[in-house]
Image: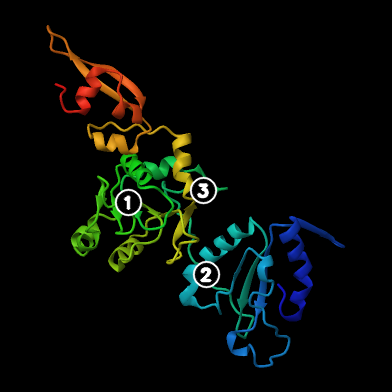
Amino acid sequence: MLFGPELETLRAAIIEPDRFGGTCLNRGCIPSKMLVVTADRPPALRDVGAPQTIDQTNLYGRSVRWFHDPGVPDDSASASWRSLARRSIDAARAGPVHLNLPFREPLLGQPGELPPRLTPSTSADATILAGRVIDGLDGIVNAERGLILAGGRGGVAPDEVDALAAATGWPILADPISGCRSLDRSVTAFDAVLRSEQFAAGHRPDVVIRVGRPAASKVLATWITAGGAPLVQVGGPGVIDPDHRVAVHLPASSMAELRDDYSIIIVTHNMQQAARVADRTAFFTALADETTGDRTGLLVEYDLTTKIFSSPSDDRTEKYITGRFG
């Protein structure tokens, strides 16, 4: 870890990878993926002529993908340390990152306990690599008591949120700006519901998937934090982790990717739901044996959802859609 004027010696090693994807100096080649961690004086010793001190804020300008100065370490902020480390490493996958860490004297001391790990050791655990779910998907989807938080600017269409809710059976707590308040599984008055201590204590989720920005509800935020369930963040804008509790980050595109990798079958008699969330639709009916009365399933028609609901091939399908069947 360097500080002060010595930091200028790193400038070439940072600028070259930024522009050309890597660089080779006298002592060997440096890859473009780089996390530069610098020590700094505390704010009280900046701009007052302290020795061996330069302005290290945004020292490398636009040559780094991300710069952050978290301030002087304090036990009250320890819950954010692992989240900061994770975000720094993730950002460094795309190029150089500068993390500036100021310290107060004495610089030597007894190390304390590290904050608890972010990634939960539960069946709802997941690992994300290059924006895709590669492990733990079944654990997330099959959690007994899950919850979907729908916020604004997530980059995820309401239809995709609805499909996830239908596939998992989980309710959606929909913020007014989410565009999801009209969905079948949406709960819109969740703020009032969660003010009931008995209800809130008896309905804590095993896993939470948040789409977009957090809802503007302090009651909801307090309830989610107190429950301690793994939090999966889907979509942006940018990095969303105000409580430093997100265990898994997924891009908005991952919702569509799941459609490509997994087949989700929804059995419903709700035609509005089928027309809204399904790519393909099958219409089944049942034939009754005149002697025994036993009923046997019959596939009447299967096609693209748009075709089924606009121009079905079978007359029985059209009668069912228009309410004239049976």
Which residue matches tag 2?
A: 113
- Work out which residue is located at the far bottom of the displayed protein and give it: 48
Identify the mark at residue 127; answer none if there is no mark. Answer: 3
Given this view, does label 1 or label 3 mark the residue nearer the observer? Answer: 1
- Work out which residue is located at the far right of the displayed protein and give it: 26
Q: Position of residue 318 (x, y in %)?
A: 23, 23
Q: Along the polypeptide, which appears first: circle 1 or circle 3?
A: 3
Q: Give yes or no for contact between labels 1 and 3 (Cβ–Cβ under 8 Å).
A: no
Classed neighbour count for the residue bearing mark 1: other residues with Cα under 10 Å, few (<14), some (14–19), many (≥20): many
* Quarter of the view holding residue 163: top left
Identify the mark at residue 99; answer none if there is no mark. Answer: none
Q: Along the polypeptide, which appears first: circle 2 or circle 1?
A: 2
* Quarter of the view holding residue 281: top left
Which residue matches tag 1?
A: 147
How far is disc 1 from disc 3 in space, using C-alphas?
19 Å
Q: Give yes or no for contact between labels 2 and 3 (Cβ–Cβ under 8 Å).
A: no
> Could you tell me which secondary element the residue under label 2 belongs to?
loop
Residue 234 placement, left or right of 281: right
- The one nearer the camera, 12 or 193, is 12
Q: Is residue 94 above or below residue 278?
A: below
Q: Is residue 222 above or below residue 319?
A: below
| Amino acid of disc 2 | Glu
| Amino acid of disc 3 | Thr
* Colour approach in the figure: rainbow
Q: Quadrant of the N terminus?
A: bottom right
- The one nearer the camera, 230 or 266, is 266
- The one nearer the camera, 273 or 225, is 273
- Work out which residue is located at the far front of the displayed protein and give it: 311
